[in-house]
Image (cartoon, rainbow, N blue to C red):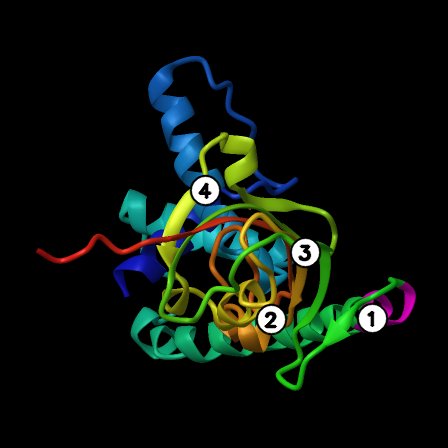
Amino acid sequence: MKTLALILIASALFSCNKQAKVSLSNDELKTFYTVGHTMGQRMKNLSLTDDEIAAVNMGLTDAAKGTEAQVNPDEFRVKIQELFKGRMTKAAVSEKEKGKAYLEKFVKEEKDVVKTESGLAFKILSEGKGNNPKPTDTVKVHYHGKLIDGTVFDSSKDRGQPITFPLNRVIKGWTEGVQKVKEGGKIKLVIPSDLAYQDSGAPPKIPGGATLIFDVELIEIVKEPKKK
């Protein structure tokens, strides 16, 4: 409930054409704006209307100023989780439908694409040499991850720093997909939500139900140090 409270407070700071504009003239105001913007990103999947955002703002203002509540908070507080869950589920269904269409188009229109039984689609861009990793291997990779609308949510390439991790400790689509390429190889993965972050997503950057696209370079399979 603490996280939910923060989200509700932040949604009042979330942009709304009915609320007053504030000049961000000092670092404190800019900090509070950043809090609102960061938490507001977590509200995008709720598809709030201006009236709904304004209602949150009214509740926050009344409570902060000690004004009598216009409804019985105890009566409606129990409905918060139900409402949020319903909105998030609806948004995830929409995302999955769009992701399914994208994946099917990728399989149909791109050359040399393979779709596995799990629903993963991949295209080997460069075969590489040496061995394919096993699920229990630790791998060193470079990657570029984006949503189907082209929004980049994470990229080791942009950071200029590869990442190393056990292959069986990431999302299922990665565990399965990276095994398809050899050391030094490159692969494109289109991962449906069931093999990624499912209906919950990974807020604020990855919405629930999102299909993910990764360009992955398998730099090496990291050798375990020999035990003495």
105 part of magenta stretch: yes
Residue 175, position in %: x, y?
Answer: 48, 69
Give me the disc on residue 107. Answer: 1
Residue 135, position in %: x, y?
Answer: 42, 71
Residue that mark 3 sits on: 127
The answer to whether mark 4 and mark 3 are in CB contact below 8 A is: no
Disc 2 to disc 4, C-alpha distance: 20 Å
Q: Nearer the viewer, mark 2 or mark 1?
A: 1
In front: 18, or 137?
137
Q: Magenta stretch: dominant SS?
A: helix
Q: Which quarter shows the C terminus?
A: bottom left
Amino acid under label 3? Glu
Q: Residues within 10 Å of mark 2 (few under 14, many from 20)?
A: many
Residue at image point 36% right, 55% down: 165
Amino acid under label 1? Val
Q: Nearer the viewer, mark 1 or mark 4?
A: 1
Q: Is residue 70 above or below residue 83?
A: above
In front: 128, or 47?
128
Mark 1 falls on what kind of element?
Answer: helix
Direction from residue 110 to residue 71 in the image, left or right: left
Label 1 vs 4, first from the N-terminus: 4
Label 2 vs 4, first from the N-terminus: 4
Disc 3 to disc 2, C-alpha distance: 30 Å
Disc 3 to disc 1, C-alpha distance: 19 Å
**Residue extending furthest toward the left:** 228
Residue that mark 4 sits on: 38
The answer to whether mark 3 and mark 1 are in CB contact below 8 A is: no
Amino acid under label 4? Thr
Q: Within the image, what quadrant is residue 30 found in?
A: top left
Which residue range is magenta in the image?
Answer: 104-109
